[in-house]
Amino acid sequence: MASLVLSPPLRPRVPFPSYLHRLHSARSILASPGHVNPNSRRRGNPRESLAASVATEPRVVVPLPPVETERGGEQKLAAWRSVRQERWEGELEVEGEIPLWLNGTYLRNGPGVWNIDEHEFRHLFDGYATLVRLSFRGGRMAAAHRQLESAAYAAAKRNRRLCYREFSEAPRPENFLAYVGELASLFSGSSLTDNANTGVVVLGDGRVLCLTETVKGSIEIDPDTLDTVGKFEFSDGLGSLIHSAHPVVTAEEFVTLLPDLLRPGYLVVRMVPGSNERKVIGRVNCRGGPAPGWVHSFPVTEHYVVVPEMPLRYCARNLLRAEPTPLYKFEWHPESGSYMHVMCKASGKIVASVEVPPFVTFHFINAYEEEDGDGRVTAIVADCCEHYADTSILEKLRLQNLKSFTGLDVLPDARVGRFRIPLDGSPIGELDAALDPNEHGRGMDMCSINPAHLGKRYRYLYACGAQRPCNFPNTVTKVDLVEKRAKNWHEDGAVPSEPFFVARPGAVEEDDGVVISMVSSQNGEGYALLLDGSTFEEIARAKFPYGLPYGLHGCWIPRKN
Ligand SMILES: CC(=O)/C=C/C=C(C)/C=C/C1=C(C)CCCC1(C)C
Ligand SMILES: CC(/C=C/C=O)=C\C=C\C=O
Ligand SMILES: [Fe+2]
């Protein structure tokens, strides 16, 4: 069994946090008889307030769990296996050179625990939120890993069963009365999960939030300790239960969309630093369908918010079901049309609403305004990771499918979908591939850009692409939207997470910086990978002492001094 003592012990050249070698790790608490909670057989309502559930656990050194092995002793990819670390911290040995200017913290959130005892979750998006941190200073790298103490996670640990509705999983009511109670709690939102497993953002005032698609799953954390601070309470009484998992966050504002399932549409809202109050910028009424389209993310330009209306729409009936449907809480309505709406940020007025070809996307990449010779904005260009209007990608993200790669090429094709939304009153917008998708192996998701280009013209995007055959995006790709070429990083059998671009302070070129990704490698290990943003050559990697589960989105917090 591996142990967490780094060998040989590293002697910091620059002061590092003193907690680096105080470690606490435990695998699958929910499966470990040693962790049976005395309350675990408790009946009644297992849901509780987040504040009550925030636990401060003792820091003790315990051995690392053995890396799971397949029959015959061959080690397995950790990406889709639960890797529980209630509290782990350590310095990582670096191969290569970390630029001395890289000074700050990269935080990544994502599902990382997909079981409760013997019960294995169904879908990638069901897993309990897992934070991994990389701290860079003076060319060195330290790391930390913790579970987020959401009420959903705390209740699952305490009761050893699912207590809240996750993306594809719902607690099974024990009888008809309990079922009626469940329905009532669904309308109040109390049965929805607060498992904030999708992203992590830094507000302009420095507060750090983990987020998911339920509004109650907005949870503040302390980036230094990864402690769960508590639920982020919005003080505005806007009342929506769900929002986009990806608000657009800058030093000046937090902008997000609140889908309205009763009167199909979206509220576009804005919150400023230091406040917990979202103010309504405006409202978009849906043009099609029985319900709003899923808005996992949306793009903005300097002056406009773009509201996508996909034919993959929320479905009230599916929300009420305990059993998953083929598209989970959603339904595909191609007949309802697909639209892109553009709202002026200053006035809340809708300046364009055009019909576009059908599309399926989780992630918008960026958007910008096109001007004519007189500086008048004539169109909005909005780019996304587009799945050819094929919803089967949702099914491909089931854990059973992710875990059973047979060598067949089963990842559906994806492209950089580029919308052109005219602002001259024409009713139709365009959607085309921004470059030949073969440049990135016809895989495209989990994207980032240089944040200095948010809402502006830009040339480069970073994302995960594909080296086929594969069942999941397995490359890190840099796309040059001007040359229409891509550079691809790949390692056999490895699964890299979202490449995250960090600009060099003082940089002039858009791609002057580094790209960080966390890789789960074929042999069961996990490492942080640094690529040069410009050449896309590997500049450093640093191995974790255990395998890393897959994670979703990250953020960068520069060090202040
Ligand atoms: C991880 C990720 O990308 C998406 C997570 C989405 C979640 C947890 C969605 C949850 C939902 C419910 C539990 C009920 C209401 C609808 C919806 C927001 C999809
Ligand atoms: C990981 C993923 C899609 C991969 C497709 O190729 C989507 C994640 C969505 C949530 O953040
Ligand atoms: Fe996402």
Image (cartoon, rainbow, N blue to C red):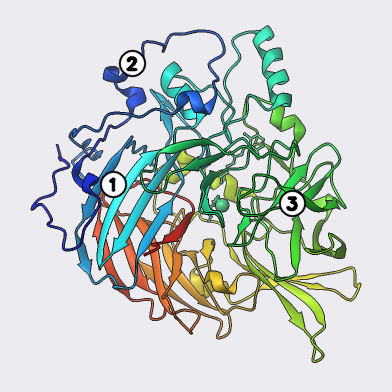
- Viewer-side label of 3, 2: 3
Query: What is the quadrant of the N terminus in the image?
Result: top left
- Viewer-side label of 3, 1: 3
On residue 174, which mark appears?
A: none
Graded by Cα atoms within 10 Å as few (under 14), some (14 to 19) or many (20 or more), the crowding at tag 2 reads: some
The reply, left or right, for residue 35 in relation to residue 354 is left
Graded by Cα atoms within 10 Å as few (under 14), some (14 to 19) or many (20 or more), the crowding at tag 1 reads: many
Under mark 1, the amino acid is: Gly
Q: Which residue is mark 3?
A: 269
Circle 1 sits in a helix, a strand or a loop, which is it? loop
Circle 3 sits in a helix, a strand or a loop, which is it? strand
Residue 161 rendering spot, x and y as whole percentages: 47, 20
Closer to us: 470 or 415: 415
Asked whether residue 349 appears in the rendered view, the answer is: yes
**Quadrant of the rendered structure where residue 92 is?**
bottom left
The reply, left or right, for residue 269 in relation to residue 460 is right
Q: Residue at x 38, y 62 (%)?
A: 559
Q: Which residue is mark 1?
A: 547
Closer to us: 425 or 118: 425
| Dot placed on the residue nearer the N-terminal end, 1 or 2 | 2
Q: Rounded to the nearest whole Å, what is the CA distance between mark 3 and mark 1?
A: 39 Å
| Dot placed on the residue nearer the N-terminal end, 3 or 1 | 3
Closer to us: 442 or 165: 165
In the image, is residue 226 above or below residue 31? below
